[in-house]
Amino acid sequence: MKNLALRYKILGFLIILIMTLTVLTSTYHSNRMKKLALNSVKDVQTKFTQQLALYMMEPLDYDLTDEVERIIVKSRKENPEIKYIQVFNREGVSVSQFGNAEKVDILDLFKEGKKELFSRRVKESEFLVEYFYPIKINGLVRFYLRVCYDNTKYGDHINEIIMDYIKIIYGVVILILILGYFFFKHILFYPLEELLVEMKEARKEFSTELGDEIRSGDEINYLRNYFNHLISNVRSKSLLLKDLNTNLEKKVEERTEELRGAQAKLLESAHMAGMATMAAGVLHNIGNILTLASNTAENIRRLVVDSNVKHFSRVKDYISSKEECSFNDESRKVFRAYDELVKQMESENADLVKQVEVLTQANRTMLKTVQSQQKYAKVGNFLIEVRIDEVIKDSIQLLSESLGRHRINIHYQQEHVRPIQANKANLLNVFVNLLLNAKESILQSPDINNPMSVDIVISENEEGEIKIRYTDTGIGMNQETLDNLFQFGYTTKDKGSGFGLHDAANTIKELGGEISAYSEGLNKGATIEILIPTA
């Protein structure tokens, strides 16, 4: 078997990890067992000390020294762990003692706030523990009892139990490691080698599409490099298609901007000087430019439809034909992932086709707008019955790709409103202008937590007026901007023309309506409100 070093490195790592966890776990449980056992011994010794104090209470009260000595000796026989016992009077003087004990100032110990039984270790020893207990007669402390226990014997028993426990744990772990080795050898090592052979065979058949030979020191890296190489090829194709789509959209936006500027200039010139002939010429040139953009969009659509992405499905079909007879479960998982990748590529290619079709439709809509303006320049404003909600939805659809790319959400809400008599192309231009200004305002906001949304609400008030409100979460406006927002040529943008909102205001006024703007200040968003009469 090739490249055993990598596989045994994996096994070695797993063994070290398991042994480390075993050591830590056994150490923790050993210390906990020892602590619990010593606490149990402490409880027993506490009760014994209290009982010893009760036995001594009456002999000490009557100063029966011999009886006290007898009780001490008896207690030592019943509890061999007692190292020494010492009785102090209330002045802190030792009146009775068994065994050798270091001197201690009993009164200082109880002055530290200790009034009942308490214990302490002797010289930081783990197994030597002293208990101090005040002996009360008629409710007053008359004597103090000091008892020391040597728990070394219990410690030895506990250590023996812990060692047996650790032996059992290590035995179980070693058995698991042995079984695990054979298990991994069966489910991982052999399938990896078989998978590698199949991948090399597949690569030989499709080497012209996948490029140069992939080199690697082991099977895992070979598989990783294989898929990285495959994904890199897919990504490069996808980026190429996206770049074509982005360039087309940029051209459309540039042409749209030119169209808006030309329309605004045309209307202003028509209102001020009646230069309808010049306006018609400008719109004719713009129409030619849009026709060129439409043809370019159609060419890109054909390029996307005829893309070489479909060739990757040949690899998928080949692998699918091999799956049932040649691959194990792990291999099938890998090839299912490849199958999903191919499906995703095909889905993205289909999405690009749809987006190009949307752009083509947008060009057609703008051509209709130009044609409408050309008619307007010749014969005046042509009015038809228009549903404002449909026009607003069309404007959202026109900018859906741009809004989606910048992750700007549109929250649309409408009530039933009556249709009005208006020029549909002019209204579409108004709502496109409002959406574009809202988008640019949001993108200028410095707030990293900006929800990036535009709320559009359509309703009809009691006076029979259609009320349209655009509210964005953008950079907002100061008072100066609010006062001059709809003035001809006024703009706050470096590359702005100041025609879009002025043109929108003129269109609304021609319909007998009103347009106004509100904002609480910079970085607080803004609202544009339109009122249009229905009669």
Image (cartoon, rainbow, N blue to C red):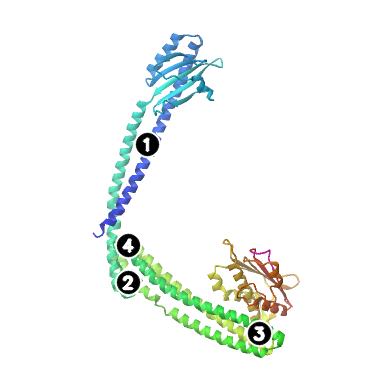
Q: Which residue is mark 2?
A: 318
Question: Counting residues from the N terminus, which is met first, the one under dot 3 or under dot 2?
Answer: 3
Q: Identify the residue shown where x is 64% and y is 87%.
A: 279
Drawn side of residue 291 relative to residue 426, left or right:
left
**Helix, strand or loop at mark 3:** helix
Q: Which residue is mark 1?
A: 30
Residue 156 in which image quadrant: top left
The image position of residue 322, as x and y in percent, is: 30, 68
Drawn side of residue 287 relative to residue 95, left or right:
right
Question: Counting residues from the N terminus, which is met first, the one under dot 4 or under dot 3?
Answer: 4
Note whether residue 498 is visible.
Answer: yes
**Helix, strand or loop at mark 1:** helix
Residue 409's place in the image compared with 20, above or below, is below
| Range covered by the magenta-colored residues | 518-522
**What residue occupies the far front of the structure in this picture?**
494
Q: Amino acid at mark 1?
A: Ser
Q: Identify the residue shown where x is 55% and y is 85%.
A: 289
